[in-house]
Amino acid sequence: MTVSRDRARRHTRYFLSWARAAAPVHLGADVDMTRVEEHRAAGRAAGRRYSVVSYLLHAAGRVVARHPEARAMARGVLWPRTAPLPDVAAKLALDRRTEGGERVVLTAVLPRIAVATHTEIQDLVDLCRESDPHDLPGAAAVRLLNQLPPPVGQLAFRLGVRSPGTRAQRLGTFAVSSLGHRAVDVFHSYGGTALTFCAGRVSDRAVVRGGRIVAAPVMRLGLTFDHRVLDGAAAADVLDGVVKRLEGWHGDLSGTRDEPRDGAGIRPTRAGDRPRGPLGAGP
């Protein structure tokens, strides 16, 4: 079991070794999730479940798309510089188990996240969580890395994320990780991208509205940014934009390409909602 588990986590160790070159800095903000929770409740009443992660992916994708300085990667040692990344793709971290029962972290890259509708994003999140780990995009490459001798696997990983095109394909433009299903209020991680969003649990906290203290569902959102790629003011602008989008969530879901909606702003569930094509295919 020890040997099997060690092999199953080799790709994580290769990533951690490579990630030591980064310069992570951490920010955080409290997000009033009242409107998001109201929308989730309306969704449940209409027969549709929406996870908190889908709202974060939707909001972050649209904000990152408006900040080209955040859609980049650091390159070079003797001649440090940044290189732009194509498209806006999100890397979603998943807690999964292998065939042998080992608990490992796997990832899936969701492309075109800045133009995908909220419903499409939730469909992809559901597919990632419910699919066989072998069917996740990039799963074959992870298995190969874990089977290679460690020195070879380490080199293969570094070569695989060296260019902007392959970096965006394998690690995304930004990363999202959530521990909100546990009693975790705040945490910070680094996903190998210029920006990594870290979502804690949503719990009732005291907030001030109109001079009065009331209870509201609040999520503590962490943001880790790579200081080699962008500065704190730019990262703070991104975090502020994501917070405002989540707190200002409304039923018509700006950017949903005129999907039909009921009175609560929920697109009616219908047969065929779940994508049938390969995971990661464009909408």
Image (cartoon, rainbow, N blue to C red):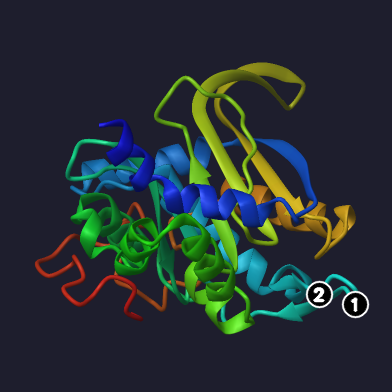
**Which residue is depicted at the point 33% across and 56% down?**
125
Judging by the rendered image, the residue that carries numbered circle 2 is 76
Decide which of 225, 166 is in the foreground and name it. 166
- Residue 119 is left or right of residue 87, and the answer is left
Query: Is 36 drawn above or below residue 132 in the view shown?
Result: above
Task: Identify the secondary structure beneath mark 2.
Answer: loop
Separation (CA) of disc 2 from disc 1: 5 Å
- Residue 25 is left or right of residue 132, and the answer is right
Decide which of 267, 58 is in the foreground and name it. 58
Measuring from the top left, give residue 7's x and y in whole percent: 35, 46
**Which residue is depicted at the point 52% across and 35% down?**
34
**Which residue is depicted at the point 38% across and 40% down?**
6
Q: Which mark is residue 79?
A: 1
Q: Is residue 90 at least partly visible in the picture?
A: no
Decide which of 263, 281 is in the foreground and name it. 281
**Which residue is depicted at the point 34% across and 46% down?**
8
Q: Quadrant of the C terminus?
A: bottom left
Measuring from the top left, give residue 231's x and y in whole percent: 88, 58
